[in-house]
Amino acid sequence: ALLVVLFQLERQDRVSTNVFGGLIAALEANAPIAVVNGVRLTSEDLAENTEQLALTATAQGLNTEDPAVQAEISNQALDIMINTLLLEQAAAERSIVVGDEEVQARITELEESAGGAEALAARLAEFDIGQEQLVSDVQEELLIRTLLDQVFADTEVVVTEEEIQEVYDNAVVASGGQPLPPLEEVQIQIEAQLTQAKEQEALDVYLESLRADADIELNP
């Protein structure tokens, strides 16, 4: 699943005694860092997506104060932005449209999964995400999901018994002699992991094809 959210831009150094300080800051925020098939991605866009990944990285225990980690997060954020835009453009070419009822149904699913509307709102508030942004994110998610369903409609992902056995055997070796559950107890989980990996591989190939056909200009 593909799940993409935007976060509020941290507006540091936006107030200045300089009369033109606000104007300069606005121009910098809107400076294009990439142009994808004629569509501009701005520094503000990148800042929002970088903040999203930084919060996720922090939750995973990574040190986001490390310059190397920061650089990796920024690079990943830009890649996600470009890939998402390419997928949205591909969906537009197929005239894919997501209706309000579909969006509301998905939000209801998220609310039920979170334990209710209030619980979901509280969770999103931790990331400064309001209702308007939630609707936008869900609409984007459904749009891309519909596109990928169409693209891979005739693609069958097959996981063989041999592949499952190989994963299990490798886990046994890696365990260093520690006891593991019998294969029969974990076979379904291994199959699901292999299926997800193959689906991701197919998505990566599709994204590479979109990038190959796209006009992408990166600005330093």
Image (spheres, helix red, strand yellow):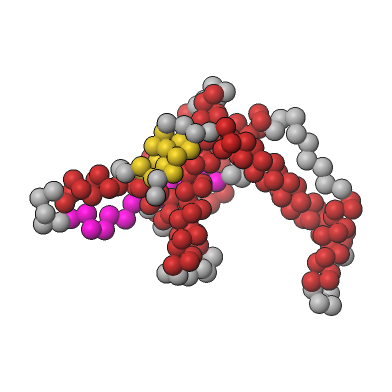
Q: Is residue 186 above or below residue 142?
A: below
Q: Is residue 65 above or below residue 32?
A: below
Q: Quadrant of the N terminus?
A: top right
Q: Is residue 98 left or right of residue 160?
A: left
Residue 132 placement (x, y as % from top left): 38, 40
Give yes or no for residue 13 being in the magenta stretch: yes
Q: Is residue 106 above or below residue 13?
A: above
Residue 78 placement (x, y as % from top left): 47, 48
- What residue is drawn where x is 77% and y is 55%? 189
- What residue is drawn where x is 57% and y is 32%? 213
Q: Nearer the viewer, residue 25 or 110?
A: 25
Give yes or no for residue 166 being in the magenta stretch: no
Q: Is residue 201 visible?
A: yes
Farthest-out residue, bottom: 177
Kindly indicate the quadrant of the structure image that contains residue 64: bottom left
Farthest-out residue, top: 95
Q: How many marks?
A: 0
Q: Is residue 203 visible?
A: no
Residue 112 placement (x, y as % from top left): 55, 46
Q: Tell me where the magenta segment starts and ends, as one range.
A: 3-15
Q: Is residue 161 left or right of residue 218?
A: right
Q: Is residue 96 left or right of residue 188?
A: left
- What residue is drawn where x is 80% and y is 51%? 191
- What residue is drawn where x is 83% and y is 71%? 173
* SS assignment for the magenta stretch, majority: loop
Residue 188 placement (x, y as % from top left): 80, 53
Kindly indicate the quadrant of the structure image that contains residue 38: top left
